[in-house]
Image (cartoon, grey):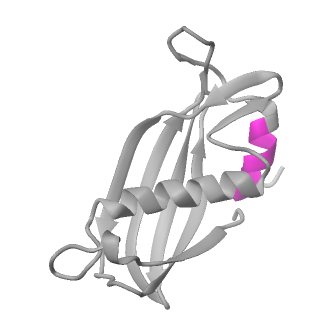
Amino acid sequence: MGKVFKTERRVEFRDTDTAGIVHFSNFFAYMEQAEHALLRSLGLGVICEVDGQNISWPRVNAECNYRNAIKFEEMINVHVEVTNIGTKSLTYGFKFFRDQTPVADGSITVVCCLFKHGQRPESVPIPAGFIEKIKPFLRDQLDQ
């Protein structure tokens, strides 16, 4: 089992709807913020240079399943794992908790792309240096 990156945030008033609960769309922003925090903790980013390549990670899929409502001023804990590392893509898994209560879970799949000024992004294999840093967070690791 891989490491789990954990971060927390307080629900802000702007995150809530007229019912006083977090609007569903905000969970996607929370997932992206948690992804960014994980990458920063590893000295990486969603736009960064790795192994001499300027790469970024466009999203190709995102989903979220809701379990319980959360409200203004509540603290939520976000747990992040990597559920899959492919040749050119990886998938993050997210679990949201209020105290010990599951609130939601979701995933985001991203594709490694090379960016050159004035050109369209080109999907490329994930650089070895990136894999080396992110691999400890891979959920199901085989002993090697």
**Residue 138 visible from this viewpoint:** no
Q: Residue at x 62, y 40 (%)?
A: 46
Q: How many marks?
A: 0
Estimate the x, y position of residue 110 in percent, counting from the top left. Answer: 51, 38
Which quadrant of the structure image shows residue 123? top right
Judge from the rendering whether residue 89 lies leftward or rightward of residue 73; answer left or right: right
Which quadrant of the structure image shows residue 56? top right
Estimate the x, y position of residue 128 in percent, counting from the top left. Answer: 79, 32
Q: Residue at x 34, y 59 (%)?
A: 64
Give the residues in magenta: 130-140
Q: Residue at x 78, y 31 (%)?
A: 50
Estimate the x, y position of residue 62 in percent, counting from the top left. Answer: 38, 47
Which quadrant of the structure image shows residue 35? bottom right
Q: Magenta span: helix, strand or loop, mainly?
A: helix
The answer to which of 131 and 11 lies nearer the viewer is: 11
Estimate the x, y position of residue 113 in percent, counting from the top left. Answer: 58, 24
Placement of 105 over or under 46, stated as above or below: below
Specify the farthest residue to the bottom: 99
Q: Residue at x 33, y 82 (%)?
A: 70
